[in-house]
Amino acid sequence: MFRAAWSRTVDTYRAVGLTRIKWAQCANKGPQANNGTTGADVFVPGKVDVVGLDHYNMWPAQTDPATWAAAVQQTPGLASQMRLADAQGVRWSLDENGPAHGSNGRDYGGDSEFYASAMVATIRSNKSDNAFVTIYDDQGLPATLNHTFEKNPNWRNAVVKALGSGW
């Protein structure tokens, strides 16, 4: 049903000449992400320009190489979305990302210096296939997630440095 609705929507926009629209299929990683579907389950060939992902420092907290690898390898996850984009001949995007705070330390990694450097390194090493990266300087919902630069100096410093060097 989703795939049919996506196709009809894209076809309708294209039929009336709206061609400067990028169709970004964006998954959300985490325990309640996408009702158990993968990006490939809902991909519509010829109707998606960018395969994206929301990847925050949560579900699980990513504070060391092992927890980073576990998060990146989730399905859907950063690695699976990049593979899907490559297999379909489109670019990948990081539609949302950053630190995330919460009361459970296993789930929320906060302003982890490791997360910040791992995310920047991943973007840099895959930038030739990247369409865009969205960086939020916002509280988030709920506000306890706290994605702001002011409250997350490790994240702010890593992003500012990366942007200054062209990723």
Image: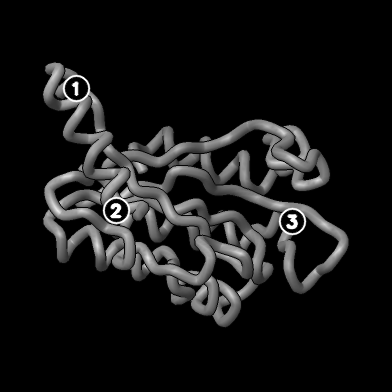
Q: Secondary structure at mark 3?
A: loop
Q: Is residue 126 above or below residue 153?
A: below
How many neighbours does mark 2 have within 10 angstroms: few (below 14), some (14-19), or many (20 or more)?
some
Residue at the bottom extreme, as displayed: 66
How many neighbours does mark 3 have within 10 angstroms: few (below 14), some (14-19), or many (20 or more)?
many
Q: Quadrant of the N terminus?
A: bottom left
Q: Secondary structure at mark 1?
A: loop
Query: Which is closer to the viewer, label 1 or label 2?
Result: 2
**Residue 149: image location, x then y, percent:** 68, 35
Numbered mark located on residue 144 in the image: none
The residue depicted at 15 percent of the width and 26 percent of the height is 14
* Amino acid at the residue labelled 1: Arg
Q: Is residue 149 above or below residue 144?
A: above
Disc 2 marks which residue?
3
**Residue 62: image location, x then y, percent:** 63, 68
**Does residue 62 appear anywhere in the picture?**
no
Q: Is residue 80 above or below residue 127?
A: below
Disc 3 marks which residue?
110
- Nearer-N-terminus badge (1/2): 2
Q: Quadrant of the C terminus?
A: top left
Numbered mark located on residue 20 in the image: 1
- Between 75 and 111, the residue placed more toward the observer is 75
* Amino acid at the residue labelled 3: Gly
Q: Is residue 151 left or right of residue 155?
A: right
The residue depicted at 68 percent of the width and 68 percent of the height is 61
**Residue 142: image location, x then y, percent:** 78, 42
Quarter of the image where one finds residue 43: bottom left
The residue depicted at 57 percent of the width and 82 percent of the height is 66
* Amino acid at the residue labelled 2: Arg
The residue depicted at 12 percent of the width and 17 percent of the height is 17
Residue at the right extreme, as displayed: 103
